Amino acid sequence: MKRVIPLREVEAFDLETDVLIAGFGGAGACAALEARAAGAEVMVLERGSEGGGSTRMSACEMYLGGHGGTALQRDLGFEDSTQNFFNYLMEAFGPHADEERVRVFVEGAAEHFDWMEGQGVPYKRGFFAGRDVVALTGDSLQYTGNERTLPFMRVSSPVPRGHLPADSGHKGGEKMMGILLARAAEEGAVIHCDARALALVQDERGAVHGMLARVDDRDQLIRARRGVILATGGFIMNEVMTKRHLPELERVCTRHGNPYDLGDGILMGVAAGANAIHMSEAFISIAHYPPESLSFGIFVNDRGQRFVNEDSYLARIGHFAAQQPSEQIYMFIDDAHFARPRYVLNTKVVAVGETVAEVEAEAGLPTGSLRSTVELYNAYAERGEDPLFEKAPEYLAPLTKPPFALVSYKLSDIRPAVFTLGGLEVKPSGEVLTVDGEVIPGLYAAGRTVAGIPRTSKGYASGMSVADVTYFGRLAGRAAAAKL
Amino acid sequence: MKRVIPLREVEAFDLETDVLIAGFGGAGACAALEARAAGAEVMVLERGSEGGGSTRMSACEMYLGGHGGTALQRDLGFEDSTQNFFNYLMEAFGPHADEERVRVFVEGAAEHFDWMEGQGVPYKRGFFAGRDVVALTGDSLQYTGNERTLPFMRVSSPVPRGHLPADSGHKGGEKMMGILLARAAEEGAVIHCDARALALVQDERGAVHGMLARVDDRDQLIRARRGVILATGGFIMNEVMTKRHLPELERVCTRHGNPYDLGDGILMGVAAGANAIHMSEAFISIAHYPPESLSFGIFVNDRGQRFVNEDSYLARIGHFAAQQPSEQIYMFIDDAHFARPRYVLNTKVVAVGETVAEVEAEAGLPTGSLRSTVELYNAYAERGEDPLFEKAPEYLAPLTKPPFALVSYKLSDIRPAVFTLGGLEVKPSGEVLTVDGEVIPGLYAAGRTVAGIPRTSKGYASGMSVADVTYFGRLAGRAAAAKL
């Protein structure tokens, strides 16, 4: 398959525009809006029969803060300095972080909220204080990550940063993307659905001049006078790529995304000389909450050892679970806190007993292994402490009320939702970089086609992807439109 | 930096050959020998002032077996079926493994030993039975990996597979590479040292026709009538690449390789459309043995939890150590087994005490954390069992003789040796593949420039790299020479 066509082989272009965008999800729609706002002609190619991408499938929570707080945070009485937000993100991604990208993001995130409201996305001035994957109360602000857990609290004061469209719960994506897609059309972006980007047109110096695409059932060459933006999503639906880059996870995961998360943009970018980075990083979800009472339980591996503070965000749980020596993960819990998780399917109660020893024996764990873990945990929980994993006191209570249960979260049973975080290396402007760190002229990328703000499941929080893809989608649209 | 030059911009080539090889280490030298044997003209470009690469710096142990055993294994009374060898490698690399490559390797490995002896590399019919990084006795056969540990023994009968040049200990690389470099010259390969491969010459269909290289202090275009072989090593010395692909490890590691492990071949390959895979995988060495008595100790993380069977091979120890929640790793040991590791530098005794509780307190570990781990370990060790990590009975004894010590193996202190395992995706023939799995005509790669047999530190064993780079270097040389 040819993903790059030499410019000199092009006799004539069939279509022309200023900014050509492949992919009409969150990144593509925001890029289109900003490029139009800057006065550029815009054409969007969407492989599906309608736009929205994986962003539409999400709750469209955006992880935002900084500048003292977004309008929503401030209206609800929360303060969030740019430095506080920066510290949180740097703790979340550590050496994986792209510090320059993080800086640009924390500087612009509060304004990004205003922009999104300005587009017509409604936000309700209400704060949801519970522990849930998304607020189902209609409120727009909530904690979504590890803000109130350690080690994060050591470097950043806890502030809720999940910004959810009003009254939409899990359906925020339909609301937000419905608005953004309509706005892009209204602003005059030319939109082709059922249109597949096939190859980049590149000259001998490496500059990109357009694309070959299947539009209206014909292969057409499209010239982009100012720039091409790749925004075709991640690659979780591409089985060849996931086998290469996520060999262990792909066997146990539920592929989370839209059917066109096939890596098209990444593959075209790499074929044009781009650098792909963090290709083995992915978001891995184990949402054992709600109900909140399950955060009182303890996760253990097949050696009976704990591996994470159970008050962590679902992707941090997923990250550490996936690192354990085998895919056999359990939750140990007592009768005072037992419940069924609302979101994790196919957990199994594998042992029940009046004593920890009974449970341990019934589950076939080495004698004493689970017992020593529970004894140590309980001794500290009694005092409201968890020196090993630093779970917050609000979720600490000795697990002492029989019967006790061991619940299997075996990965190949629960099949955690996974999507990819690796992709093209870009500047904050969306300019795509080569393996040598040089810009490929005329080529931009945004969304999960790039390695963005979230770069490992360990530090992920709900809303980071949508915030990243929409915010940096805008920057890419602006940068491409500005090029003459 | 331009890593690909369009063929049509080439007016004339300055030099010509049949097979052009970039890199004169283990892979390049073997490729040169086989290409010459097939009657091709061969030219080798070596960036250093002499050949040998990182292979020369190694002990040049080769991990071989199959077909009932290599000549060396059989002469020493060991049997190793092809299936047994295959099972071992598949257990070692699991879903990371390239099964086709493994099959080709286990089929050819015994013959490869004969070939190496045929080149003049001496092997001594002696078996070293101890636990050491390399045999220092002059013997040529030893266990080098996880053969006698679990879970490996469940799928593969233990056989020693480390084949070390005779009487050379750590200096086997000088012996083997000295011979191979001389043989390549003797067989008529044209060798240019201080010559740097800069870019591939590629036509519009993607086929590779030669290289631009700095030879004799001039940029020269070299035509390769049959093929170009990239064999420039891995990328552990490239700080930009390691920061991208090994962000956590690069901060704590000792970069292990020759100064030209800069990723040149990978970068040129990617620029020409190749697929780079497993770029975040690396060999990580924590060689706590010898002395063997340290295998009686237990490794724990900063929560006092064990994480590996301590009789594992050094790279498996390194793999699990690097996965722990913090870089603070310890060994707990008693006076009956205490010693200083011969190879790991900068370990520190951070606590000594008459009881485990004293040691725990002195080291600042949470009260009861280390104690519960040691109690459980000792209770089982007493019976010669280790149900949690399955350490072999020969290294199991309760740690009960005071004083006890906790020895820090903090990664940023001990700085484990690390080299990269990711690289270009190739067929067993060395043909380089695009992101779509298509062959790039005329382009071959071998050595640590490719993702080879060893693909994660977890399953690595000494000798796997040298066996892989020399064996598949030969196949690449043969495949390139065969093309007309």
Image (spheres, coloured by chain):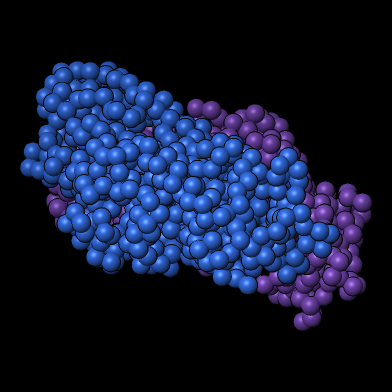
Chain colours: A purple, B blue
Q: Position of residue B380 (x, y in %)?
A: 12, 41
- Which is nearer the eye, A182 or B472? B472
Q: Position of residue B248 (x, y in %)?
A: 50, 37
- Which is nearer the eye, A167 or A458? A458
Q: Position of residue B185 (x, y in %)?
A: 54, 50
Q: On the rendered image, what quadrant is the N terminus of chain A found in?
A: bottom right
Q: Position of residue B241 (x, y in %)?
A: 60, 42
- Which is nearer the eye, B130 or A118? B130
Question: In the rendered view, does B449 fall on the left or right side of A474?
Answer: left
Q: As displayed, is residue A143 above or below residue B77?
A: above
Mark count: 0
In which quarter of the view is residue A298 placed? top left
- Whether residue A265 appears in this view of the structure is no
In which quarter of the view is residue A15 placed? bottom right
In which quarter of the view is residue B338 placed? top left
User: Residue at the location (82% across, 75% down)?
Assistant: A220
- Whether residue B119 appears in this view of the structure is yes
